[in-house]
Image: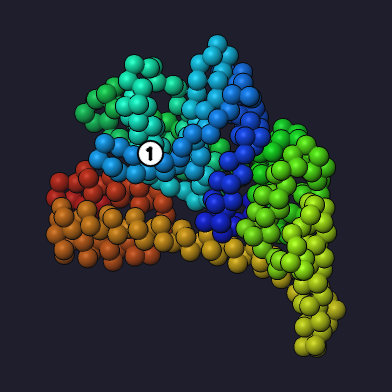
Amino acid sequence: MAQAPRIPEGSDRALRRLFGHPEVVADLLRGFVPLAPVSSFDRNSLQPLPDNRVDFNFNKRESDRTWSFSIEGGARVVMIFEAQSYEDRAMAGRMAVQVAMFCENFQRLWPSELLPEVLPVVFYTGGARWRAVRSLSEAASGKAGLLTYFADSCYLLLETGVLATGPLPKHNLVSLIVRMEAARGASDLVEVLASEREFLERRHPSLWSDYFTWAVEVLAPVKRPDTEGRGVESLQEGIDMIAERIQEEREEWRQQAMAEGLSEGKVKGLLEGRAEGRMEGLAQGRAEERARSLAREKGLLRRLILRKFGDEIAEIWSERVSTLDDDDRLRELSGMIIDCETAEELLRKL
């Protein structure tokens, strides 16, 4: 199933809330972390750790979630978890800093203890494939031949778009997240929730509300059903209300189209188009976020050229890349700026 776009910030916040539940983290480790030592983790040993980290200079960093757990033999593992709805090419560096700051704080507090092993995990829900490097050594030039001394910090990447194309563990809370992310529109999302309603309500009664909230506020926003001041009391009630609201919206669109004199065939086409239009609007939000990310990267590279080659070359460079929207080409250009010794050499390669 193709992956549905969504509002990035809302998605990340919702996933941070969901992965604050030990049941969800347990299903992540049990079904989606392909590392043999982790498969033997002790479910009862899961403990949340502070997500804020401060170094000796009082610089602060915060991960989305941090959990610790024990594996067979009693060894302790710490998982630093980040939810990402768009690609971040600095992720290898970000995760390396998170791991380093955790280790620094640990050694400061318990100087005589051995460090626990750290598992950095990036849970990516974006529509496009993740292409950012996974380790710092991949991002380094390696020309000096000193990569042996370079921090080879690597994170485990879990892409919901890729996971959705293969078999998923049954009755698994993270599988449900993947399926909901892959849903196309509110109707499809209702079907996914309905198929797992009993699993959520009976086995995880404390969780269904967070899944429902994520569905109606982020994945396929619909007007909140009127509950006359009370909360939705069951997932089935929530599903029914969403389905009812979808039908009300479709009827509103149909009445509007008929009032404008459209034929039944055109009305049917309008309804199908409006159903997809909601998702297209969310796709536009993702496109705008990507455009802002590209603009930031171009601005950073322009400042680098300005400092190395001067204002005139920076202006020429800006004109030539003004319409460039290829991530790979920008990555190549950033390497050229560093490698080229003269402005003439840089302009020849542009």
Q: Residue furthest right?
A: 264
In this picture, residue 241 sits left or right of residue 157: right
Assign the C terminus to one quadrant of the image: bottom left
Please provide percent x and percent y for residue 201: 79, 43
Which of the 4 quarters of the picture holds residue 102? Answer: top left
For residue 343, above or below residue 244: above
Dot 1 amino acid type: Arg
Indicate the position of residue 283 as horizontal and vertical percent values. 58, 61
Residue at horizontal 80%, vertical 52%? 234
In-image side of 295 versus 187 (left or right): left
Q: Is residue 25 visible?
A: yes
Classify mark 1: residues with Cα within 10 Å, few (<14), some (14-19) or many (20+).
some
* Residue positioned most to the top: 73
Residue positioned 27% across, 54% down in the render: 301
Q: How is the image coloured?
A: rainbow
Residue ID at (57%, 53%): 11
Residue 164, picture quadrant: top right
Q: Which residue is mark 1?
A: 53
Q: Is residue 162 above or below residue 187?
A: above
Q: Residue at point 61% right, 29% down? A: 29
Q: Is residue 59 left or right of residue 213?
A: left
Q: Nearer the viewer, residue 116 or 330?
A: 116
Return the x and y of residue 296 as percentages of the image width and height. Answer: 35, 58
x, y percent for residue 184: 70, 56
